Amino acid sequence: MTDGFDDRIERELLIAALPPRVAESLRAQGEVPPEGDGLLEVVLDLGRPPAARYSDREQVLDESDVIEQDIDHVVASVSEFGDDNRAGIPRTLHRISAIRNRRGRIVGLTCRVGRAVTGSAGAILDLVESGRSVLLLGAPGVGKTTMLREAARVLADELGRRVVIVDTSNEIGGDGDIPHRAVGRARRMQVPHPELQHQLMIEAVENHMPEVIVIDEIGASLEATAARTIAERGVQLIGTAHGNTLHNLMQNPTLSPLWGATVRAPPGAVAARRRAPQTPVGLRRAPPTFNSLVEIQSFERVAVHEDIGATVDRLLRGFDAEAEVRTVGRAGDVAQVERVSVAPSAHESLASDRDEASASPRMLTPAPGGPPRRLLPFGVSRARLQEAITSTRSQAEVVDRLDEADAVLTLRPYYRRRSGPLREAEARGVPVLVLRNNTVTQMAGALLRMRADGDGVDPTTAALREAEDAIAAVSHGGEQRVELTPQNSYIRRLQHELAARHGASSTSRGREPYRRVLVAPGPGAGAPPPWPRGESR
């Protein structure tokens, strides 16, 4: 990646604001221009030697301690400090943060170098340009704001979209009333006080008709709620939040609206008596505020969760999920892509049917219904397709050639272009199944529809209707419990979730392939009678 702006002049403005002896020492080291790209910040603490921090080291700039006059010199050279103890230099991206004593006197300064890097958003341009709302996570200093700033410029200048930046502490657009040129034609609303960020977020949507809202550091509940309100109005969101990974985000209740939150339903009364105490089932309350999540691991490496909802669902049920790790080349483009497994943490594994979640689904025999199928994936994940086959217990296998396939699975963009084997498949009369997303959920639905085509009955619809009738019977019809017909683990999980949403209890009993769900009244409706002796679960 290369800088699209001449940072040397702006960097010199920051150095000129430092005490003269510190500035001279910094220049004498040859680390500012043109070799100063590694300089991150200069630290001035009262009674200690001034120090410069680089990407790989920290170096003392002068043996003499910092005195009050040094602090006062910097304070007089920059803009006024706000309530967040931050100031800047007008029309630059530099940030000066203050440390105060108990009487409010400034006793320390962190002078951070701000840079605009053209191409820094190359790893996520496909997500940003598609109109998806994208949430960026990462450790401090890893480049979240730099990527956010570049995404705003690309959307405003190259795609011509109406972009409004809600800028707390002038982190994105720089100090002063005129935004830094690094944000392009994006408009900027400055937040006067950090606690008012959520109000400015709503005001931006109501007053300025943006197509895209850019937000830095969503960290409070009101800000998370405001972001959801914006997303529900159809506005694209590009933002950052506190946390390094998706696991951190899911363990932060303040930011739960960003990923859909959880509804914790109590386990079945029968299960509570027959099993050891267990964690309640975790369900998403609503769709996530953001469509995609990006974990910034370094300036050259990011992990992408393209569908947050699907990833969260798998983690909540105790299954591994997948992330796409992208490595960025020197030109800012994606040079390498690999898929890695993401295991659920102890806090996220909230499966209602825990013995099913912990057992390997590969041990199950295929479910009856429909003829065997040979499937050719084109533009979709082969590993995810195999996972969908396993979870639905479909009689299907993945093949490599069109002449071996009974059907082809692909995505909409590939189908519109009729690329690869798709044109030949249509010429031969081989069915082409078009998925909306490259997710296990989409593939599982396609497999179940194929099974329905084979025997004339949609097993998912029939099973959920049966579960609804059973819930109505135990809730209003006086039934103590209703046993459903045997289903595979995928459909049983849907039945458990349906029962939980309606306040009923449910548990699984029996052994594969005859394992089935039993529905009983919820805890508030009275416990069902004891199980008969000798009856298997």
Image (tube, helix red, strand yellow):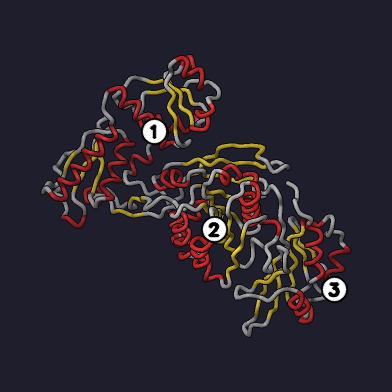
Q: Position of residue 241 (x, y in %)?
A: 54, 58
Q: Is residue 366 above or below residue 219?
A: above
- Quadrant of the rendered structure where residue 487 is? top left
Check disc 3 and report the residue beneath it: 20
Q: CA distance from mark 3 to mark 2?
A: 37 Å
Q: Residue at x 70, y 41 (%)?
A: 329
Question: Which amino acid type is marked by label 1?
Answer: Ala
Sequence-wise, which precedes: disc 2 or disc 1? 2
Disc 3 secondary structure class: helix
Question: Which amino acid type is marked by label 2?
Answer: Ala
Q: Position of residue 421 (x, y in %)?
A: 53, 20
Check disc 1 and report the residue beneath it: 444
Disc 1 secondary structure class: helix
Is mark 3 in CB contact (under 8 Å) with mark 2?
A: no
Residue 420 lies left or right of residue 500; in this view the side is right
- Depth order, front residue of 379/140: 379
- Depth order, front residue of 26/279: 26
Q: Which mark is residue 241?
A: 2
